[in-house]
Image (spheres, grey):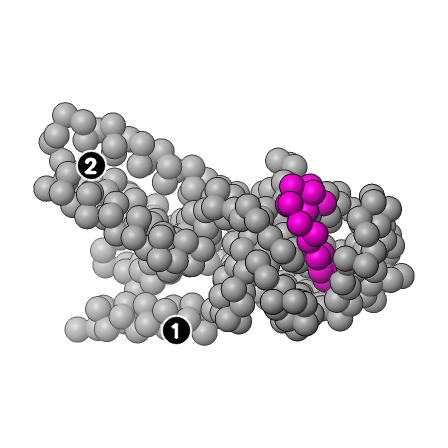
Amino acid sequence: MLLSASMVLICLVILLTIWDPHGLTSAVVTVLSGGLITLLATLSHRPWAPLIAGTGRLIIALIGAWGLFTLLLILGTPRLIVRKRERLTLGLLAGIWVWLFLGVAWIYAVGHGTFNDTVWPWLTFIPAFSLYLGVLFGAGLVGYLRVICLRSRHADTLVILGAGLLNGDQIGRVLGTRLDTALAFAQRQDHPVTLVVTGGQGPDEALSEAAAMAAYLTQHGYPAERIIQETAATNTRTNLINSQKLWWRLPHQGGRVVLITNGYHLFRTRLLAHQLGIHAGGYPAPTRPGYIVIGWAREFLALIMLHPRLHRGILIAMIATNLLWMLP
């Protein structure tokens, strides 16, 4: 049973990956399938089942540890994680801390036999919704790995997403790697490539991100006539919408369009592009290891905010189910 069920799940994951390689649904199915295979292997008596079960538990533990660290990072250093134009209110942070405390207490009560005939059964929706968020976190990591591996090789138009300017007018390390990646990508092509740089001017910036990016590219020898500036965007969604209007004016509507941003940001960028009906490839710029955890924490918050109504609906459904289950 373990072998046949595992093969069915693996085939399902492969089919969904081919059908929608950068989608959130296929990533969620991948995570759930991995968890189910681990559970089946744990219950199986096959001689090779412990190896599969142990590997699965190790992966789950690593994802869980990263997720918990991300949560603590968000709670402990919100100014480092949340973008400068956004903020986490004290009430929200306090609510997350209370949620975390109750979730840990619920697990402790279950593990120490003090669960029944207490208030804890009424709060089962807390670990249930936390598990749901954990699955989304794991799906985000799967999507992150996919965009790193399944990258475009050819392009006629490259769209480079902005990342903010240091001191109001300087290209930072993150944005610099995106621009360097675009330059290297364009040089590998056997035909001229148009670069679209996108990013508006923030309240603390002396010029638009697009203007600073264009200056950087020309200073590194890229022809100015093959650079198009989009100077009004304020976030990833408007980066895509405004840039599409520009590349549609190019011959053949830009040809093969590839989005360039850091790997941790590319998964959400591709999801947004899909939602907007934009067909474009993706190519990840490298990120220094020390920044990946911070960048991913920011991206996970943004991923959650892509479907806030869905998450609220699932939470309400879990609370309602919990109450109906407890009522006599």
Q: Position of residue 95 (x, y in %)?
A: 52, 62
Frontmost residue, 191 versus 32: 191
Using a 10 Å C-alpha cutoff, classify the residue at mark 2 as few (fewer than 14 neighbours), some (14 to 19) or many (20 or more): some
Q: Residue at the location (19% across, 31% down)? A: 49
Residue drawn at x 36%, y 69% is 314
Q: Confirm whether the magenta stretch covers residue 96.
A: no
Secondary element at image label 1: helix
**Image position of 275 with respect to 217: above or below:** below
First in residue order: circle 2 vs circle 1: 2
Query: Which residue lies at the image location 46% right of the left edge and 40% below the top edge?
Result: 65
Discs 2, 1 touching: Cβ within 8 Å: no
Front one among 231 and 293:
231
Q: CA distance from mark 2 to mark 1?
A: 33 Å
The residue sitting at the right extreme is 206
Residue at the spot of label 1: 313
- Which amino acid is tagged 1? Gly
| Helix, strand or loop status at disc 2 | helix
Tag of residue 189:
none
Q: Residue at x 64, y 45 (%)?
A: 189
- Residue 317 or residue 162, whichever sits in front: 162
The magenta stretch spans which residues? 183-200
Residue 227 placement: quadrant: bottom right
Is residue 32 in sight in this rendering?
A: no
Q: Quadrant of the C terminus?
A: bottom left
On the image, the x and y values in percent for residue 179 come to 73, 48
Kindly identify which residue carries mark 2. Answer: 42
Taking the magenta stretch, the answer to whether it contains residue 188 is yes
Pick the quarter of the image with the N terminus: top left
Q: Position of residue 129 (x, y in %)?
A: 37, 60
Residue type beneath disc 2: Thr
The image shows residue 290 at horizontal and vertical percentages of: 64, 36
